[in-house]
């Protein structure tokens, strides 16, 4: 590809040019291999390159050939071909029996249709379902989308569903098929094995992705429903790395409220970049003092490091609750 064309077209746009050149069936087959976001990006780019020049097309093709030559191998999913060959050779019934024994188990519960629905559609879909079904479906979503879905569900359902998300574990194959039926309107082939979903960390991510008002409403009800589980979810909503998401002003204010002993132990367990980020919010003299103390102490027990980091998180949350500092949370609001 010429230097001018390389600068003017992005990788997605070059792919879009190629898509416009292949036949409809080939283009459709390619799109089926992409995830929803990739389909949206590629479709948008196809409109953008509709008036591409002949020279640009030639350059795109040259670039494609050059890149193809650089590849040492081409990866593909062998499953469709193997299934087709087995079915033709043995018949559908025997092929299913053989494939059930030889097909590698899926890494996760593949409720693929969820990827193609927006939050409002998913909320409408599960609002009338049993809370356990809703919990499993929500646990399959990205936390940012799951938080939006949770917000759109009736207030009375939110604590129960989040509670179920936190307590999810192995999901039986039959339950997975029921969930697929809810989405697709029919039963698929039997799953090879159960899957594990949810947990307090997942529930914490979902609630963190929701707006502060949702968290303020759900957490008190969760504490009444299951106090110990609610505490675990609350802890999962904020980890030590989240401290680094604060701006220098808020991070500096928080650090000034942390005892030097705690800070020395806590920083023993972070990488150099994170350590410099935190110490950079202190005066040069104070930062040098912390570094000297860390070096003088030598190795520190992991349990002591984790305890010190938890103490810093607790201090940060306390300062945020009384309005002394601001910490990032779900949506446009803050939640800690």
Image (spheres, grey):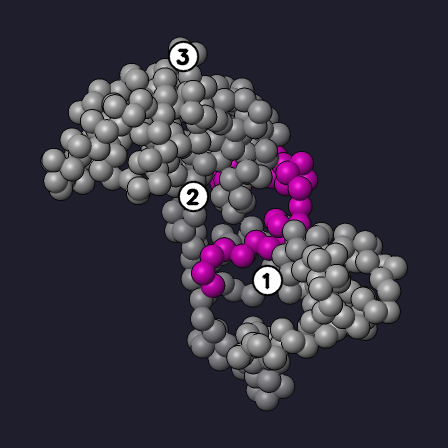
Q: Quadrant of the N terminus?
A: bottom right
Cα distance, mark 3 to mark 2? 33 Å
Mark toward the viewer: 1 or 2: 2
Q: Residue furthest bottom?
A: 89
From the image, tell me which residue sits under label 2.
198
Percent x, y of residue 328:
48, 26
- Return the residue nearer the eye: 27 or 269: 269
122 is within the stretch colored magenta: yes
Q: Is residue 292 visible?
A: yes
Q: Residues within 10 Å of mark 1 (few under 14, many from 20)?
A: few
Q: Residues within 10 Å of mark 2 (few under 14, many from 20)?
A: many
Percent x, y of residue 316:
35, 21
Q: Earlier in the sequence, mark 3 or mark 1?
A: 1
> In the structure shown, which secondary structural element does the residue marked by tag 1 occupy?
loop
Determine the image quadrant of residue 18.
bottom right
The residue positioned 29% from the left and 25% from the top of the image is 284
Percent x, y of residue 17:
78, 65
Mark toward the viewer: 3 or 1: 3
Badge number at residue 324: 3
From the image, tell me which residue sits under label 1.
188
As drawn, 121 above or below 98: above
Percent x, y of residue 290:
21, 29
Q: Earlier in the sequence, mark 1 or mark 2?
A: 1
């Amino acid at each position: 590809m010429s230097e001018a064309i390389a600068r003017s077209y992005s990788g997605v746009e070059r792919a879009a040019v190629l898509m416009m050149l292949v036949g409809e069936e080939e283009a459709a087959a390619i799109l089926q291999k992409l995830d929803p976001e990739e389909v949206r990006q590629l479709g948008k780019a196809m409109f953008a390159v509709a008036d591409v020049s002949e020279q640009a097309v030639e350059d795109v093709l040259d670039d494609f050939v050059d890149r193809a030559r650089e590849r040492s191998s081409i990866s593909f999913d062998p499953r469709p071909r193997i299934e087709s060959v087995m079915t033709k050779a043995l018949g559908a019934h025997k092929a299913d029996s053989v494939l059930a024994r030889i097909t590698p188990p899926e890494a996760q519960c593949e409720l693929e249709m969820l990827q193609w629905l927006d939050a409002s559609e998913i909320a409408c879909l599960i609002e009338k379902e049993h809370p356990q079904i809703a919990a499993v479906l929500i646990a399959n979503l990205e936390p940012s989308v799951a938080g939006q879905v949770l917000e759109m569900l009736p207030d009375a359902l939110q604590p129960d569903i989040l509670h179920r998300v936190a307590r999810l574990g192995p999901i039986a194959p039959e339950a997975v098929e029921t969930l697929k039926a809810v989405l697709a309107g029919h039963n698929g082939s039997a799953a090879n094995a159960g899957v594990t979903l949810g947990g307090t960390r997942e529930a914490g991510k979902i609630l963190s992705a929701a707006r502060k008002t949702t968290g303020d409403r759900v957490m008190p009800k969760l504490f009444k429903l299951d106090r110990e589980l609610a505490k675990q979810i609350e802890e999962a909503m904020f980890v030590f790395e989240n401290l680094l998401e604060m701006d220098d002003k808020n991070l500096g204010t928080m650090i000034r409220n942390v005892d030097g002993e705690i800070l020395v132990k806590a920083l023993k367990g972070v990488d150099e970049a994170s350590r410099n980020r935190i110490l950079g919010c202190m005066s040069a003299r104070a930062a040098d003092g912390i570094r000297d103390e860390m070096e003088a102490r030598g190795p520190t027990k992991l349990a002591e490091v984790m305890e010190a980091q938890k103490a810093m998180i607790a201090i940060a949350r306390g300062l945020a609750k009384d309005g002394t500092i601001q910490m990032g949370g779900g949506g446009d609001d803050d939640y800690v």
